[in-house]
Amino acid sequence: MNEKYTNLLIKKIKENNSYNNNYSTLLKKPNYDYSDLTVGVLALQGAFREHIEAVKRCGAKAIQVRLPKQLSLIDGLIIPGGESTTIIKLIEKYNFKTHIYDFYKSNKPIFGTCAGLILLAKEIVGFNFGLGLIDICVDRNAYGRQIDSFEHAIELKIDSKLNYNVKNLNSDADKNIKKFANNNIDINNILIKGQNNRKFNAIFIRAPKILSFGKNVKVLAELDGKAVLAQQDNVLVCAFHPELTDDLRIHYYFLDIIKKAKNMINFN
Ligand code: GLN
């Protein structure tokens, strides 16, 4: 039942949000080329298709991961939102657990959104499952029931490495930006600043709450004083659904983590 509601809600949110965000037209490409990266999205249940689309729009390759052996084909793994109780059952059924641990130990980044965050947490209130790869304690559904799902603008404390396509700036306000560009002022710096300051429209669906976290966890965004985007080394988690908006900043950030991890692997 929960699963059905989640899917309906995701559909509705996508209709409202899909590609109507002006900023997306401004995005050209990031400073980095991500085409050499392959990201796997755990495709056992939940919002995996939307993550695949987001990763592809960032310029990286994306594949659905349905079998443990596919982990050897990817540089980073996304565990999507959905039903954590269902996903964990399937993880166990398909014998994913040890393979995900090996993946983690080989320094490959993992990004968990919503149910994915729950699955990666070290502690889940009242439950004894999960992978325990990030030192957070979470309460499932603590932001309310399905009916209480909501959107909220949050500030991201991450570095944006995005560039912009000057040619796509058409509105009156954008003309000033073009003027800067024509005067050879560094347009990227100006725009990146604006981009960084812009809030992220975070969509929460029966979201888990991070109650506490260990000292090695970096908080990258908060809502009402609680961490909603957090990172510990190569593990990134968020309590909301970045794949349901048009804003790719968090996916780009994950790709940057992968790039870094890959270089460390290559150069060590
Ligand atoms: N509350 C869900 C769970 O416990 C997560 C919801 C979501 O991923 N949107 O798994």
Image (cartoon, grey):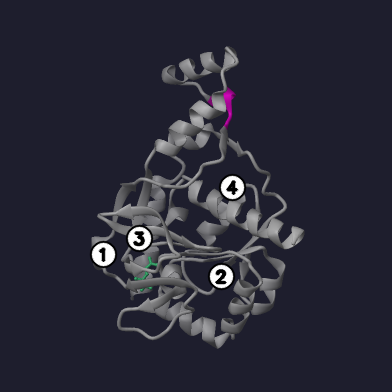
- Magenta stretch encompasses residue 251: no
Q: Secondary structure at mark 4?
A: helix
Q: Which residue is mark 4?
A: 57
Q: Kindly report which numbered mark, 3 or 1, lies closer to the viewer in this rendering.
A: 1
Residue at 51% x, 24% y: name it.
Answer: 169
Identify the residue at horizontal 52%, vertical 33% (top origin): 25
Residue 180 seen in the current view: yes
Q: Badge 3 local density, few (<14 within 10 Å), some, or many (20+)?
A: some
Residue wearing tag 3 = 9
Q: Where residue 42 is drawn, which disc sits there?
A: 2
Name the amino acid type tagged 3.
Leu
Residue numbers of the magenta segment = 164-168
The amino acid at mark 1 is Tyr
> In whole angstroms, how far apart are the C-alphas of marks 2 and 4?
18 Å
The reply to whether discs 3 and 4 touch (Cβ–Cβ < 8 Å) is: no
Sequence order check: which comes first, mark 2 or mark 1? 2
Looking at the image, residue 157 sits to the left or right of residue 192; the answer is left
Residue 188: percent from left, percent from top: 56, 28
Find numbered disc 3 in the image and state the secondary structure of the residue it sits on: helix
Q: Quadrant of residue 209?
A: bottom left
Task: Quadrant for the C terminus, please.
Answer: bottom right
Q: Residues within 10 Å of mark 2 (few under 14, many from 20)?
A: many
Does residue 234 sit above or below 152 in this rendering?
Answer: below
Q: Nearer the viewer, mark 2 or mark 3?
A: 2
Numbered label attached to residue 143 = 1
Q: Looking at the picture, does residue 181 appear above or below residue 58?
A: above
- Label 3 or label 1, whichever comes before in sequence order: 3
